[in-house]
């Protein structure tokens, strides 16, 4: 979650050095008038623009209009993907506006309290399919190891026909973060280094690579 363009560019270089496949730029703390194209072109790695509100456990404190305008500006700057929550008003129109600028859209759903049943996850997914995103992201909160298994079970079926990101946050969710790519997940999330996590239970890139190499799956 960089605070300046220079910090964002520095973090991009670190992510590139560690072998990231995507870079999610969290826009929450960045000024509205920054040079987003400078961030986008600094490395060749695919960029995801994300701007989380306080209600979504983010840091962006301005109003919803300003938050979406930041996402729109990010799309205009050439970011490959824009992440937008399924809880926003006028979601269909906003997705269309983002796509008109050339970005692909990740429709994200977050449950900060628990992991619903498999049936409920399927309902959420089917509802979001109606908005025709390019990627669908469903992130829950694990209260037990079994909750991680629910997300992986859902992913194993849903990812056969769609690009989906699904795992659980929290300590009990770490196994789902690690295993989700092997159940069809489009990507999993990792921090550049310890202390830079943007969500509970997030591992570092180095941790994930070490685990994958150990089990000969990376």
Image: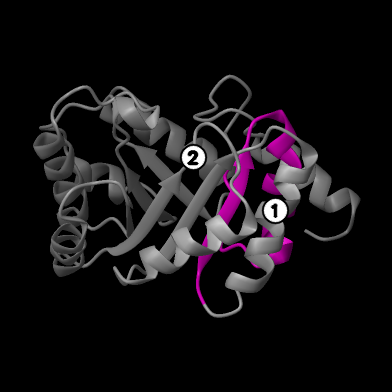
Residue 19 in view in this figure:
no
- Residue shown at 63% from the left, 23% from the top: 194
How far apart marks 2 and 1 lie (CA) works out to 14 Å
Quarter of the rendering containing residue 154: bottom right
Residue 127 in view in this figure:
yes
The secondary element bearing badge 2 is classed as loop
Q: Which residue is mark 2?
A: 111
Q: Residues within 10 Å of mark 2 (few under 14, many from 20)?
A: some
Coordinates of residue 86 in the picture (x, y in percent): 32, 52
Please state if 103 lies on the left or on the right of 191 as rendered: left
- Residue shown at 61% from the left, 78% from the top: 160
Coordinates of residue 148 in the picture (x, y in percent): 72, 46
Please state if 67 lies on the left or on the right of 15 as rendered: left
Q: How is the image coloured?
A: one colour
Outermost residue on the right side: it is 215
Coordinates of residue 93 in the picture (x, y in percent): 13, 62
Q: Earlier in the sequence, mark 2 or mark 1?
A: 2
- Residue shown at 36% from the left, 32% from the top: 56
- Residue shown at 90% from the left, 54% from the top: 215
Image quarter of the N terminus: top left
Q: Is residue 65 above or below residue 45?
A: above
Q: Is residue 185 magenta?
A: yes
Q: Is residue 106 above or below residue 110?
A: below
In this rendered view, identify the residue nearer to me: 70 or 160: 160
Q: Which residue is mark 1?
A: 150
**What range is drawn magenta here?**
162-189
Image quarter of the C terminus: bottom right
Contact (Cβ within 8 Å) of mark 2 with mark 1 = no
């Amino acid at each position: 979650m960089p605070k300046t363009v220079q910090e964002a560019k520095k973090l991009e270089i670190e992510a590139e050095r560690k072998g990231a496949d995507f870079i999610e730029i969290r826009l929450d703390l960045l000024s509205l008038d920054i040079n987003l194209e400078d961030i986008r072109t600094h490395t060749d790695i695919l960029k995801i623009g994300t701007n989380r509100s306080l209600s979504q456990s983010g840091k962006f404190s301005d109003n919803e209009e300003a938050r979406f305008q930041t996402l729109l500006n990010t799309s205009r700057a050439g970011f490959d993907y824009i992440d937008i929550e399924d809880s926003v008003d006028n979601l269909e129109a906003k997705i269309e506006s983002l796509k008109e600028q050339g970005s692909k859209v990740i429709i994200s759903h977050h449950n900060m309290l628990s992991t619903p049943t498999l049936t409920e996850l399927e309902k959420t997914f089917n509802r979001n399919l109606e908005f025709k995103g390019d990627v669908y992201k469903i992130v829950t909160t694990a209260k037990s190891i079994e909750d991680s298994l629910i997300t992986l079970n859902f992913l194993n079926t849903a990812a056969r026909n769609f690009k989906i990101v699904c795992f659980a946050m929290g300590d009990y969710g770490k196994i789902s973060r690690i295993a989700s790519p092997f159940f069809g997940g489009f990507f999993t999330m990792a921090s550049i280094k310890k202390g830079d996590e943007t969500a509970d239970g997030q591992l570092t890139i180095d941790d994930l690579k070490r685990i994958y190499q150990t089990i000969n799956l990376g």
